[in-house]
Amino acid sequence: KNLQIYVGAFSDNAREVLDKYEFSQQVKKLDGANLLYQVIGRFTDLDLHPDAVPNHNMGYIFEELIRRFAEQSNETAGEHFTPREVIKLMVNLLVAPDADALSLPGVVRTVMDPACGTGGMLSA
């Protein structure tokens, strides 16, 4: 009950993602199998403070979770995340023509990531 109240206070966007993956139903299943306390206990053992897990690494963790949930839900490839290899290829294709200019001081280029997901493409 406390977990549901806690999660209920998340932003609308976060709750929308949790609803998409039927978080409440998963919690009920775990609780019904007397596993919820153990699972939450495992999470409390993790140190996810930004001093322990930098934001960039947390982005990788988030992307991996999205990838796994998408696979389990039989989502279409790329519907919720773009694989790192594809991002790297895209960035290389976009930046390669300007590589020399980008190494000069004061040169600025504008880049748009229309999906505005985790910012992984922008950071790459």
Image (tube, rainbow, N blue to C red):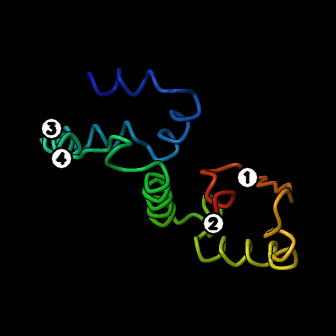
Residue labelled with disc 3: 37
- Under tag 4, what secondary structure? helix
Read off the residue under disc 1.
115
Asked which quadrant contains residue 40, the reply is: top left
Cα separation between marks 4 and 1: 33 Å
Residues under numbered marks 1 and 2 in contact, where contact means CB atoms less than 8 Å apart: yes
Query: Which of the marked residues, 4 or 2, is nearer the chain's N terminus?
Result: 4
Q: Amino acid at mark 1?
A: Ala
Residue at the far front: name it: 105
Camera-nearest label, 4 or 3: 4
Q: Is residue 69 left or right of residue 37?
A: right
Identify the residue shown where x is 44% and y is 56%.
57
Does residue 105 appear to the left or right of 81 in the view shown? right
Q: Which residue type does callout 2 highlight? A: Thr
Amino acid found under the numbered disc labelled 4: Arg
Foreground: 41 or 118?
118
In the rendered view, does 47 fall on the left or right side of 21? left
Query: What residue is shown with label 4?
Result: 42
Describe the element under mark 1 as helix, strand or loop: loop
Label 2 sits on a secondary structure element that is loop
* Cα distance between the residues tagged 4 and 3: 9 Å
Q: Secondary structure at mark 3?
A: helix
**Of callouts 4 and 1, which one flags the residue occurring earlier in the amino acid sequence?**
4
Circle number at residue 30 = none
Residue 91: which quarter of the image?
Answer: bottom right
Q: Please name whichever residue, 22 or 119, is drawn nearer the observer in this view of the structure.
A: 119
Q: CA distance from mark 1 to mark 2?
A: 10 Å
**Figure quadrant of the C terminus:** bottom right
Mark with earlier residue (4, 3): 3
Instruction: Find the distance from the CA under tag 3 to the CA under tag 2.
Output: 33 Å
Residue 41 position in % (x across, y down): 15, 41
| Residue bearing the label numbered 2 | 82
